Structure formats: structure tokens, C-alpha cells
Amino acid sequence: MVETKILLAEKELPTSWYNIQADMPNLPKPPLHPGTKQPVGPEDLAPIFPLELIKQEVTRERWVPIPEEVLEIYRLWRPSPLFRALRFEKALQTPARIYYKYEGVSPAGSHKLNTAVAQAYYNKQAGVKRLATETGAGQWGSALAMACNFFGLECTVYMVKVSYHQKPYRRILMQIFGAEVLPSPSDRTQSGRAITAADPDSPGSLGIAISEAVEDAATHGDTNYSLGSVLNHVLLHQTVVGLETKAQMEKAGDAPDVVIGCVGGGSNYAGFCFPFIQDRLTKGAKTRFIAVEPTACPTLTRGLQAYDFGDVAGLTPLIYMYTLGKDFIPPAIHAGGLRYHGDAPLLCQLVADGIIEARAYGQRQVFEAAVQFAKAEGIVPAPESAHAIKCAVDEALAAREAGEARVIVFNLSGHGHFDLGAYDAYLAGQLEDHALSEEELRQALARLPKVG
């Protein structure tokens, strides 16, 4: 059977983002000011975010219109394709029907451009000249560099040091679009210098890079901060992915039994699954939802739901989320985009409420699944996205054992063309699995901030 591709026509591109806050049975606790420990207000966020994004952070409106200027850029690659993985199904000898949404077709190579374009637009409208941000694997940095270029903004990217050296082509891509890229921890900021003084060999982390980017924005009047995950408005922008997928599945005459995605900060999976979760919350759908993370950074599977800082230096508001502690530095695994100590509060709340399941895998089994998928479907996935593939494999094999024709849908959130060094290490047998010990976990969680 020939592999099929289901596409929406351009006129069917969603014109509004879906806000799950309108339908959630329980909302997460509000973010707290790092100094007063009181709920954060718009005036606290105004120094680093434009007003329109602050409004999107707190709105309870179910639908938020997408500006035409944003839609115009979305049309460069959206709607993105949904594939039926017929060759992968055959390789797995499963009765399951497997679909994957492919966000690697975006100019940046991942889903990150969906929010980067929106954030650059709103900052441009607010008169901002420059955006400062962090990036782990480089997908977010690449996306924001492109988006800033589209809207004539300057861009400074603090790239986690281990990824800066592991993934030079991501750095080069950012620089092509005019971004300044610094290995984090850097000597540009006070927080970066403090980390380096304490640990000259620090591999960096997303928490450290966030501290540097926030400090940069807070100390320059013409600069705002831009975050590629975790925050409500970021997840909101990503729902264009799930909305398209729902419409495409309907055109295919199918409906998912299980919806899968990888999770680092939560943006790609939230944007993918939230429109489907709406049907579970409002229509009683029986769909299962599985968030997948690395065993080296098991935030959802072994972390504690508590207030914690989003960054290492403690510059951000305290966020109520599953966390491993802001001081936790994950091992230098190749899925750099999943090396974050916390997760999006909205996603975490749905995990706490039992609506989303969480799983963790070691990187060797993840790369094994990625290579198996590439051989069948011809797409080399990003190491982050490969976590979703591993889970899809397990679900497909479980369907084979049970003789069930279950429908599995996962988000292939980015391609792995800039991650071939990681695949080289896997093929050479040089990848190591990192499992967080109970003692390491206890020590990390012992340093959580005290909140009354």
C-alpha cells in the first residue's frame, strides 16, 4: 500500500488559537512574584513582555484570533502534513493505525516557529527593538532568529553550552538570520559569570540560559524576553498544530485512541494534544494522552508538583509545576530540548488531574526507535521527537499483543538533520543512558524555595 498524506487546503488554516483554560476543570495555582511571593500582576511582567502577550497569558477566552500578519507567515508552511505511517505499521507488524503530524516542514525545521512568529509580531507592534532568549537543542533559537528577521528585530540567543558545541549547525542557522549566539553560561551576564565561577566546566542548562536571557532583557530598555515553551501564551500559539491535526483526522475518517508527544517544557505536546483534550473535557471522549520525557530529566514522572523558579538565578516568577529543582543540571544527553527542570503549569495540572499520562525512556532505546522509524518512513527525527516515536512503538506492539486496531497519533515535532552527530554516536555504540538516582533527586528537591 502506498503511503498517504492528508493535507488541509490553505483556506482551512485555523484562524484562531484554542485556549484550554476555558475548559479545564482545575487551573494551576498562579505564578508568584520572586520577592513578595504574591500573585504576579501585569505590571510585574510589563518590563519583559508586550501587553498583548500578557493578556494572552491570563485570558479565559476559548478562542484567540490569529493576526493576519502572523497567518501570512504561517502560510509559508502551514497547514503542515499529517502522514499515515503505513510502512512503519508494516515494519512493526501491528494492527494499529499510526499517524504522525510532521512539523519538521517549517523553515526552522520544528514546531517552534508557530510561537516565534507570533511573539516577534506582538513585540514589533509594541515598539521593541531586540529580543533576548535561550535555546537548548537550538530549535527555539533558530525559530526566533528567523521570526525576528521577518519582522526586522535584533535577536540575542543564549545557547546551552553543551548544545552550542554538539550542534554547531543550529548555531550557524541562527547566525544566517542575523542572531547573536552566545554559549551559556556566558561572560555577558552577572548570572552567567557566577555560574562559571562556581563551575568552570558547567555544561549549562535551560535554567541557566533563561537566567541570562531574562537578565539581559531586564537591564536593557529596548529589549524584551522571549520564551519558547512553558508559558500559557506559548502553548496557546502551538494549538494551531492540534487544530489542524483534528481536522485532518476527520478528513481521513479516523479518530485517535492515543495521542503522544515528547515533553521538555511542554509546548509541542500541549499544542498538539490540547485541542483533542477539549473533546475529552467537553464531550466525554475516551482518548488517552501520553507525555514522554527522558529518564535523565524525569520531571513529570519523578518530579514534585510545587512552586519553583523557572531559571537557576531565581529571576523569574515562582511557577507551580512539576519540577526537579531549579539547581538540577541534567546530564548532557543529545535531546537538548528536553533538558529542563520544570514543565508548563497547564500541562502539569492535566497530569496531576490524571488526564495526561507520563512516561520516561533512556536515550539508547529512543535512538533505536528513531532509526527504525527513519528506515521505514524516510524521515530522520529530532532526538526530542524520537521520544514520542519510542512510545508509539510500545503502543503499537501492545496493540499487536492484544489484537487491537487502536489508532495512534504522535507529533513529529522536528527533523534531525542538524543532529547527525548524535546519530553517529548512537551508531558507534557511544551513547549512555542516564538514570537519575534517588539521592540526586532528593538533593535537588530539598532546595526548592519555601512558599507559605
Image (spheres, grey):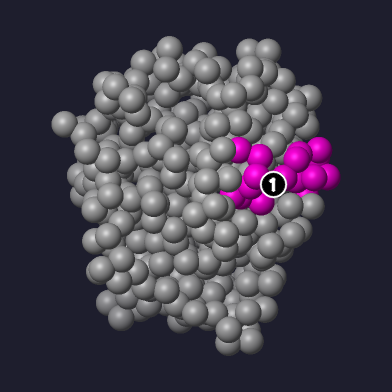
Q: Residue at x 32, y 41 (%)?
A: 308
Reply above or below: 263 against 177.
Answer: below
Instruction: Farthest residue to the left: give it.
Output: 452
Residue identified by numbered label 1: 182
User: In the shown orientation, is residue 277 left or right of residue 389?
Assistant: left
Residue under the point 52% across and 50% down: 195
Residue furthest bottom in the image: 429
Secondary structure of the residue carrying numbered label 1 = strand
Quadrant housing residue 435: bottom left
Asked whether residue 176 appears in the rendered view, the answer is yes
- The location of residue 7, given as percent across then percent down, is 62, 46
**Pick the front one: 285 or 441:** 441
Q: Foreground residue, 278 or 118?
A: 118
Residue at point 60% right, 38% down? 189
Looking at the rendered structure, the kind of residue marked 1 is: Leu
Give the quarter of the image for residue 381: bottom right
Look at the image and give the residue range highlighted in magenta. Answer: 173-189
